[in-house]
Image: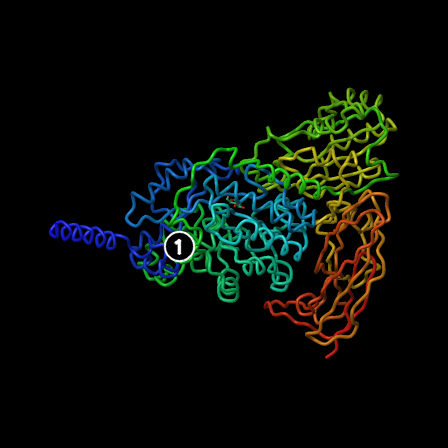
Amino acid sequence: MKKVTLLLSIILMMIFSSYKQEKPLYKDAKQPIEKRIDDLLARMNLKEKVMQLNQFTLGRNDNANNMADPVADIPGEIGSLIYFGSNADLRNKVQKKAMEQTRLGIPILFGYDVIHGFRTIYPISLGQACSWNAALVEKACGVAAQEARMSGVDWTFSPMIDVARDGRWGRVAEGYGEDTYTNAVFTVASVKGYQGEDLSSERNVAACLKHYIGYGASEAGRDYVYSEISSQTLWDTYMLPYENGVKAGVATLMSSFNDISGTPGSANHYTLTEVLKKRWKHDGFVVSDWGSIEQLRPQGIAGSKKEAAFKAFTAGVEMDMMNRCYDAHLEELVKEGKVSEDLLNDAVRRVLRVKFRLGLFDRPYTPATTEKERFYRPESLKIAEQLAEESIVLLKNENKVLPINNVSKIAVIGPMAKTKWHLLGSWAAQGNSEDIITIYDALQAEYKGKAEVAYALGCDFDGKDRKDLEEAKALAAKSDLIVLCLGEKKNWSGENASRSTIALPQIQEELAMELKKLGKRVVLVLSNGRPLELSRLEPISDAILTMWQPGTPGGKPLAGVLSGRVNPSGKLAMTFPYSTGQIPIYYNYRQSARPHQGKYQDIQSTPLYEFAHGLSYTTFGYGELKVSVSKLKRGDKLTVEIPVTNMGDRDGVETVHWFIQDPVCTISRPVKELKYFEKQLLKKGETKLYKFEVNLERDLSFVNGEGQRFLESGEYNIMVKNKKIKIEIVD
Ligand code: GLC
């Protein structure tokens, strides 16, 4: 018996010790991440390190630029893949290759563009910003993360936070509008929504701030071009959203295509290393935009792919998205001593850190689930519908033509009335347009038993074909009211979608003019990915709303607004110019030397609809602005408040925008700057107090071209709507 026990214990010892030897530290989930990185890094050879810094693509996404890589060509040592399956099967198959057929078994990081939803599609981000509901946007990003992670995506190339003031640029659709502070608030909301409290949770994904930096300043709204950005503007307009996103713990950033006053975003050592790594201490990594390293050649700062690799890598871009520059040249650059091993190791460390934080080493495979388990959960659809409702902006409502009640015949006319596809918007990931309800169908359902809803096309989105006009006029003639559904096709905004004018095509405007001749009330409904030039449509429309591109909820939120079931509360996060010729035009402009002169000779110099404009079916009365103290020293507390009363006969939600103004400063400052916003429900007749707890340093200071903040003594104004109250900072 003793011999058997001895033999067994020896065998157990051997098994334990062999197991102990085979399981290296980096595979031990109980070890601290930094120790696991150290251990793994020490085991990696040069080629393995370089491959971690590359991202290829696995298939196609909905960006025509991005081509497929067949699975067989995918090396198991690759650091990352752009993956866009709607389930994890292919992902797990390729991940198995990395885990079982490579020397060290380093998991691949799977990324994808989940910009405004994965399968449950939310309104485009510019529309979301018009909801001024950061908490709801955070929830929407949380759902997008859950659907994506359960489908095999660990990392989203989102949020896009490019402050943009030129609607000719198609990518205004993807960001949160023209204002720095607005983008900064929604940056934090989306990073928290995507990443949650624990990145390793199978409901969260790594986020990616993009496009770092200043891409929204693309000259004349053309894509991929030069952007003139002074150091002052870089800091006072573009940096804050990124700084706040890094403070919120974002895992990654994406370097931009645009040439920032001579140094492209993907080769900009100042932004990528001086600011991001040294000043902000970001400990994740930067991925290039698709091809933005290789494109340093046409941008004229690299003569070869090798030089492009050298410039991007030494500037601070850790991962090469589909340039085929790092996998081709980084190894030789290190061997030649042009790129230091330290810099290489730091880059690999950053990538591994994100992979460890995501839990990929310990759970490399995505559990199999059904579509029903992953997509369209009831709470997800509810969030989508609420966000689409709150994104709708009522721009005009003459003689209270809205909500539409007490009519028996409604004519629904226009190219947007029966489309599903165009309501998805750009970058719609795995959105399925077949699941969308059209505006027409939604209105039929909304007015079932109350009014007859009939349809006519009227015209196409563009072109010159007028064959459908007469039928539309005939329908309108026998109706009480026209709901005219116009707008933009899905691919008229998003990447590589610049337009020389933000007016709708002539054929759509002509349809509106012809219908107006019939003397019926016209409710103009727009689905659009950018601010539009409406100066000719405004006079002939009794009411105007933009629903942006609402995503999965389609026409239902709009139908709710038209019937009055939903009281609109959206307000513009981007100015609607009177004319394309006014661009750039935005709310926080710097004062002219001659405010009374310098106007356009041929058109008005003010926008058609300004930033923060949006109507409700009720009216809100703003009371007196009050400050807790009017003379302050640095460090003092300041509370500003204003009572708001719902003066109408129905409940409504009101967002109050708080602006500051520094009329005299060392540098010329904008005429006003948004520094806080608050949204509240007010029942009919109810008065509520809106409060702004001013942090003098944060809210009243200005930043200079080196990124240093200054709070100067002197007078400031705190502004709400057309009211202002003065305070003074004394030394
Ligand atoms: C694109 C876009 C970027 C996107 C990337 C991957 O070119 O500029 O926003 O994340 O490619 O699809």
Q: Position of residue 476 (x, y in %)?
A: 82, 24
Q: Which residue, as the protein is rendered here, is positioned at the far left?
A: 3
**Residue at 34%, 36% in the rendered image:** 72
**Residue at 50%, 39% in the rendered image:** 65
Q: Which of 407/421 is in front?
A: 407
Q: Which of 44/30 is in front?
A: 30
What SS does tag 1 mark? helix
Q: Position of residue 318 (x, y in %)?
A: 43, 55
**Residue at 62%, 35% in the rendered image:** 552
Q: In this view, does 73 lie to the left or right of 706?
A: left
Q: Which residue, as the protein is rendered here, is positioned at the far bottom?
A: 731
Q: Where is residue 323 in the image (x, y as percent from the top left)?
A: 43, 47
Q: In this view, does 178 lie to the left or right of 609?
A: left
Identify whether 322 is placed above or below 598.
Answer: above
Q: In which quarter of the image is residue 432?
A: top right
| Image quadrant containing the C terminus | bottom right
For label 1, being within 8 Å of ligand 1 is answered no
Disc 1 crowd, CA 10 A, few/some/many (<14, 14-19, 20+): many
Q: Where is residue 188 in the image (x, y as percent from the top left)?
A: 59, 55
As shown in the figure, which amino acid type bears the numbered disc 1? Answer: Leu
Identify whether 386 is placed above or below 231.
Answer: above
| Residue that badge 1 annotates | 352
Number of callouts in the render?
Answer: 1
Colouring of the image: rainbow
Q: Which of 148/275 is in front?
A: 148
